[in-house]
């Protein structure tokens, strides 16, 4: 085997290996970004605190109105008693100190789950919900929203990079086939140069 051909094969093998490793790394990053995004989305809630604990009829009306808002996937009611039970699990010492009070100081609330587009307009959803009346405050984690949007950006960016890589690999394969099929073809470098020359001259030809 000629030295020139051997070196070309070695270079092709090296480039192919690097491309494969890079592709695997990007796929791993994409999977991790998607997994982190799903975990954070499942954990995220917008909490709307009520001024007073509503009666059953009013509570159902509010829940239906909240679930009808755009980009709201669901609304769950949390009573004062349920809120105290949650707090007892998270911080028993605090609950013991609150037990000295004559009344439950925690407010009833609705917890909203959002659809995927909703994370880009959390403040707008809160404004629409508060316009329904009966709510005194709204809480959510802005840092969690930012992390979800960043994970989503990285996932989409990797999709674009992988798609571009596949298109480039297909183009290089076509160049290699075209140059090998030409009578007296002189190799991949000359074929790539011919494609580049055609690409530079295409706008003038189209004009």
Image (cartoon, rainbow, N blue to C red):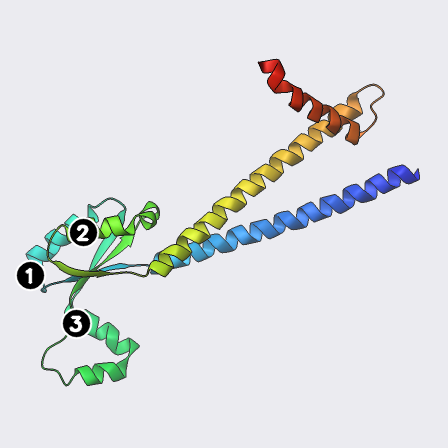
For the residue pair 89 and 142, the one nearer the viewer reads as 142
Horizontally, is 87 left or right of 117 in the view? left
- Mark sitting on residue 55: 1
Task: Determine whether 38 is above or below 182 in the image.
Answer: below
Residue indicated by mark 2 = 129
Which quarter of the picture shows residue 80?
bottom left
Residue indicated by mark 3 = 106
- Mark sitting on residue 174: none
Quadrant occupied by the N terminus: top right
Quadrant occupied by the C terminus: top right
Mark sitting earlier along the chain (1/2): 1
Callout 3 crowding tier (Cα within 10 Å): few <14, some 14–19, many ≥20: some
Callout 2 crowding tier (Cα within 10 Å): few <14, some 14–19, many ≥20: many
Task: Determine whether 187 is above or below 71 in the image.
Answer: above
Return the x and y of residue 126 as percentages of the image width and height: 22, 53
For the residue pair 111 and 105, the one nearer the viewer reads as 105
């Amino acid at each position: 085997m000629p030295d020139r051909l051997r070196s070309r094969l070695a270079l092709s093998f090296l480039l192919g290996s690097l491309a494969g490793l890079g592709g695997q790394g990007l796929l791993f990053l994409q999977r991790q970004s998607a997994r982190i995004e799903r975990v954070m989305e499942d954990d995220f809630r917008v909490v709307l605190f009520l001024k007073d604990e509503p009666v059953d009829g009013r509570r159902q009306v509010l829940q239906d109105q909240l679930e009808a808002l755009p980009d709201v996937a669901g609304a769950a009611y949390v009573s004062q008693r349920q809120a105290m039970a949650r707090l007892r699990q998270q911080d028993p010492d605090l609950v013991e100190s609150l037990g000295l009070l004559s009344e439950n100081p925690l407010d009833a609330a609705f917890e909203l789950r959002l659809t995927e587009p909703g994370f880009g307009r959390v403040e707008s959803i809160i404004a629409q919900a508060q316009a329904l009346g009966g709510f005194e405050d709204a809480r959510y984690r802005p840092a969690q929203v930012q992390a979800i949007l960043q994970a989503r950006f990285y996932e989409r960016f990797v999709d674009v990079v992988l798609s571009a890589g596949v298109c480039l690999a297909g183009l290089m394969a076509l160049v290699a086939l075209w140059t090998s099929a030409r009578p007296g073809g002189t190799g991949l470098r000359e074929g790539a140069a011919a494609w580049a020359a055609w690409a530079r001259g295409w706008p003038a030809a189209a004009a």
